[in-house]
Amino acid sequence: MVNRAAGYIQDCQWPKELDERMVQMNGSLDVTYGYNNNRQEEQQQQQQQHEHHHHHPLNSTKGLTTVGNAASSADLAKNGKALTDDDRSARQSLILLLAIFCASLFAMLYVYAMFPQLNESEKQYIKVPFDIEDAKQLGRVLDRYKDLYYLEVMFGIILVYIFLQTFAIPGSLFLSILSGFLYSFPVALTLVCFCSALGATLCYLLSQLVGRRLVKFYFPERARLWAAQVDHHRADLLSYMLFLRMTPFLPNWFINLVAPVIGVPLFPFALGTFLGVAPPSFIAIQAGKTLYKMTSSSDAFSWGSIALLAAFSVVALVPVIFKRYFKTKID
């Protein structure tokens, strides 16, 4: 019995080939399990890195934000520096303008000090005329001395006229009337046109020196619009300057100050001023012949004088009209 059981057990033992196959399978399972473990570890590391970037996106954005902030700060600093430079330039322009004005005023006082001795009652009338009564009183005093001190009186009038024109100070109209009272018509007309052109040119240069920066600093948009208008009429600037000087649409002081800012060249500006102020000066000088009869500056202008100015204004635009007419025909 025992022998039979032992034989049965011996017969039921695993074949050797099966044992070897099981060993190989166990090894393969071990290797596969190890590979799977390594694969899982790599996947976990990649997932952790992905989660790190996903949960902390500001780490990459933070660098971009820092660069953007640095660029913005640099732009703000640059703009602030530009504004500071413009403000400093405007301030320097004002100081320079004040210095030139004070120097010119000192020259006026020097001429006054070198003027012939006047009576105490006459000294009070030696001043810039700002109304027709001032012009009458000043004309009465100067009429006494102009024959004996002809050049001194004329030089004084020229200097004051140029001073008023240079700094855009009102009063030149009354000096034109006064010139018509003191001198003959040809002399008075030449004097007024010369002083107007020279004073306006100095005002132009002064505005180009300091006014350009002031206008562009305080009125940049207007300066751009004015410059565009000048570019549109650049081929006919002389005619337009003549027209503006003959008509009351724009005051002369405004033209003198704005012309260099908007790009009007000096030559058509000066020539247009010299020729353009002749018709209005003609009327003012004629009115000066009856200075004592005048009660206000408006007495110098009648309907006839206004019609004369209108006629001269149309004549000034004739070259422009013909040029455009022939250009249209050719096109």
Image: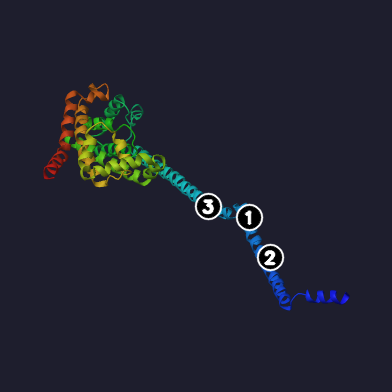
In the image, residue 288 above or below residue 208: above
Q: Tag 3 or tag 2, which sits nearer the N-term?
A: 2
Seen at 35% across and 37% down, the residue is 112
The N terminus is located in which quarter?
A: bottom right
Category of crowding for the residue at label 2, using alpha-carbon neighbours closer than 10 angstroms: few (below 14), some (14–19), many (at least 20): few
Q: Which of marks 1 and 2 is nearer the N terminus?
A: 2
Q: How is the image coloured?
A: rainbow
Tally the marks. 3
**Residue 279 point in image, percent of width and height:** 19, 33
- Quarter assignment of residue 286: top left
Residue 51 numbered tag: 1
Quarter holding the C terminus is: top left
Secondary structure state at the residue bearing disc 2: helix
Residue 173, located in which quarter of the rendered image?
top left
Decide which of 294, 66 is in the foreground and name it: 66
Q: Which amino acid does label 2 sit on?
A: Asn
According to the picture, the residue beneath numbered tag 2 turns out to be 37
Residue type indicated by callout 1: Glu
- Which residue is under mark 3? 68
Please tell me whether mark 3 sits on a helix, a strand or a loop.
helix
Amino acid under disc 3: Gly
Residue 219 lies left or right of residue 181; in this view the side is: right
Choose mark 3 or mark 1, whichever is in front: 1
State the SS at label 1.
helix
Q: In this view, does 277 lie above or below 55?
A: above
Q: Of 87 and 143, which appears nearest the observer?
A: 87
Is the residue 223 above or below the residue 286 in the image?
A: below
280 or 71, which is in the foreground? Answer: 71
Q: Do the residues labelled 3 and 1 touch (CB within 8 Å)?
A: no
Q: Residues within 10 Å of mark 1 (few under 14, many from 20)?
A: few
Position in image of residue 153 (x %, y %): 27, 36
